[in-house]
Amino acid sequence: MSLFEIIETDAGLTVAELEPGMTPEATAEKQGGVLVDPGPYADYDEAIDAIIALQSYEEEDFDLT
């Protein structure tokens, strides 16, 4: 069973599959990113939902209107 985490790369937030025997930080680094949320999420769709929630939260923080 695969588990997923959220990382940030130069392209933005993305979902990464946790690699067995590696820490979430090491998995993120191996994929060229930094760890944002280690989850672990049980499936890809759950991790995508978490990214959407994070992005919504960030947009609220920077709403200057």
Image: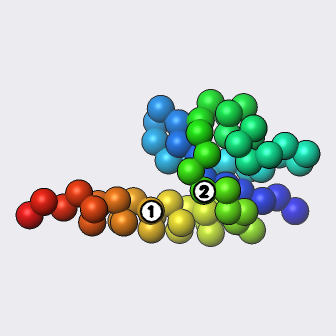
Q: Secondary structure at mark 1?
A: helix
| Residue annotated with mark 2 | 37
**Residue 64 occupies quadrant:** bottom left
Label 1 with label 2: CB-CB less than 8 Å? yes
Q: Residue at x 50, y 47 (%)?
A: 13
Q: Amino acid at mark 2?
A: Asp
Left or right of 18? Residue 56 is left
Whole-percent x, y for residue 32 in the image: 62, 30
Q: Secondary structure at mark 2?
A: strand
Vertical placement of residue 3 versus 28, above or below: below
Q: Residue at x 71, y 42 (%)?
A: 25
Left or right of 38? Residue 21 is right
Vertical placement of residue 25 versus 2, above or below: above
Q: Amino acid at mark 1?
A: Leu
**Residue 48 occupies quadrant:** bottom right
Tell me if mark 1 has few (under 14), some (14-19) or many (20+) residues whose alpha carbon lies within 10 angstroms of its own: some
Q: State how far apart marks 1 and 2 are (Cα).
A: 10 Å
Whole-percent x, y for residue 63 in the image: 18, 61
| Residue annotated with mark 1 | 54
Indicate the quadrant containing the C terminus: top left, top right, bottom left or bottom right.
Answer: bottom left
